Amino acid sequence: MVFSSMFFLWVFLPIVLVSYWLIGDRMSIHVRNGILLVASLFFYAWGEPLYILLMILSVTMNYLFARGIGDRPDDLSDAALGTASGNPSEMKSKLKIMRKRKILLTLDVVGNLFLLGYFKYYLMIAYGVNKLLHAQVIPLQNIALPIGISFYTFQSMSYVIDVYRGDAAMQKNYWKVLLYISLFPQLIAGPIVKYKDVAEQIDHREASWEKRTYGMKRFIYGLSKKVILANTFGMYADELFGLGNSDLSTGLIWMKMLLYYFQIYYDFSGYSDMAIGLGSMFGFTFLENFNYPYISHSVKEFWRRWHISLSTWFKEYVYIPLGGNRKGKIRTYLNLLIVFFLTGLWHGASMHFVMWGMFYGAFLVFERIFFGKVLTWLDEHHLGLVSWAYTFLVSLSAWAFFREEGTRIALQTLKFMWVRKGGVLSFTDILSPGLVILLILGVLLSGILQTIFPKLHDWLFRKDQYTAFETVFQAGLLFVCIMILVSSQYNAFIYFRF
């Protein structure tokens, strides 16, 4: 089910909200959690009636491993063992428990990666093995990708790892773990919510009037990003990408990249806004997933602002365990490349996604070696426009690897962005007054207006006040979105396929 579908907006969401809000604080949190759990399972089953069993299997597996890992003495830690002066039998018992917990964690990670690998990477692995052995050892078959598997797998793994580390308490109630993973506002395309960030909210939260109104406001803004901006940019971008580079002039190749540049930002950040808004309606507070990445002055800053939940996940569970920046420069560069290789692979079983990740990894290493100091110097000497232009060109170029169907075509696109060529079509065949206006809005709202007027963001997203003007404005946005959805068939979320 899609947040911007008519069924979700007019049937599913109103029924769930009314059922939830009517209960209020007069009944226990268990009843409200039950309503959300049933709604979330129905939400996923609507689009994946069979694969809901896979999600439940994944939750059950991680729940059981977490139970086994969480069952430990309170003083079981490396520090406690190192300073222990107890009897040898007690020490031996604790070491045995530690080995057991490490084995369980390893099995859990392997199990999660196996499920994700089979459904997402089977064809890529089979093709690679067969090519390496010059024989069809593994049969080639297309396996349907369960919606949201990359997101809920990472959430499940983070829960078990945090229990192992002692950063989160083991949850004994299976239904609460199932609710945490399946919660429909963030189930399909994130943000990736760590259990330790919402554990307290599962047991204690209040869907206050302030949270409800803020949630509706945030949802409408996200829906507007998606329907008015992302969908429009997407229709034009898909048309240009579908034609191929041979029919496009250099100017139109730049145009298609710019259209996708804004499409993916407003599509994904719009979804994240809707997810955060929906969570707030039910009393949850999710962490932000975007912070105007297109105003960044370095690639490093870009990744602190773009898909924050994913980048922090890789930082906490891959980069830091690999050693982070604590084992020398060469090891730091290698760790960055590994993380961004995996980031690219997480997005899809294709070499062009890997190239997208490695492209960013190479620039992050480049900035670490020396160019980061140059960017800092530029900003300190009021030449920030230069550092912004550099970051803009890097991120725009990177989307070529992400969007094009193959590395060769992506490289061709980058070539023709800088080597002038003619084409069959001209700007007049694509541009319209409406598209020009939306492009201007897309540019301004991607962070420029918020930088020029710092109080604008706080005013738009404030939680303590709700004026009549805001009510009318948001009602107008919602009306426009509904009219567009009624008249248009283009409504797919980019990150649903990851």
Image (cartoon, rainbow, N blue to C red):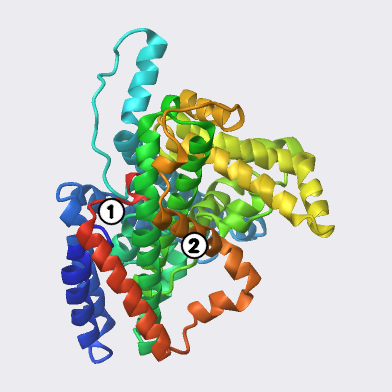
CB atoms of marks 2 and 1 within 8 Å: no
Circle 2 or circle 1, nearest the eye: 2
Residue wearing tag 2: 441
Quadrant where the C terminus sits is: top left
Residue wearing tag 1: 491
- Residue at horizontal 28%, vertical 90%? 25
Give the vertical position of 380 relative to 330 (above or below).
below
The quadrant in which residue 281 appears is: bottom left
The quadrant in which residue 456 appears is: bottom right
How far across and down, in percent of the image, does residue 368 sit?
74, 43
Give the vertical position of 247 relative to 32 (above or below).
above
How far across and down, in percent of the image, does residue 246 sit?
44, 24
Say which of 122 and 199 sits in front.
122
- Residue at horizontal 57%, vertical 53%? 88
- Residue at horizontal 44%, vertical 50%? 264
Per the model, the C-alpha gap separating discs 2 and 1 is: 20 Å
The quadrant in which residue 278 appears is: bottom left
Give the vertical position of 155 relative to 394 (above or below).
below
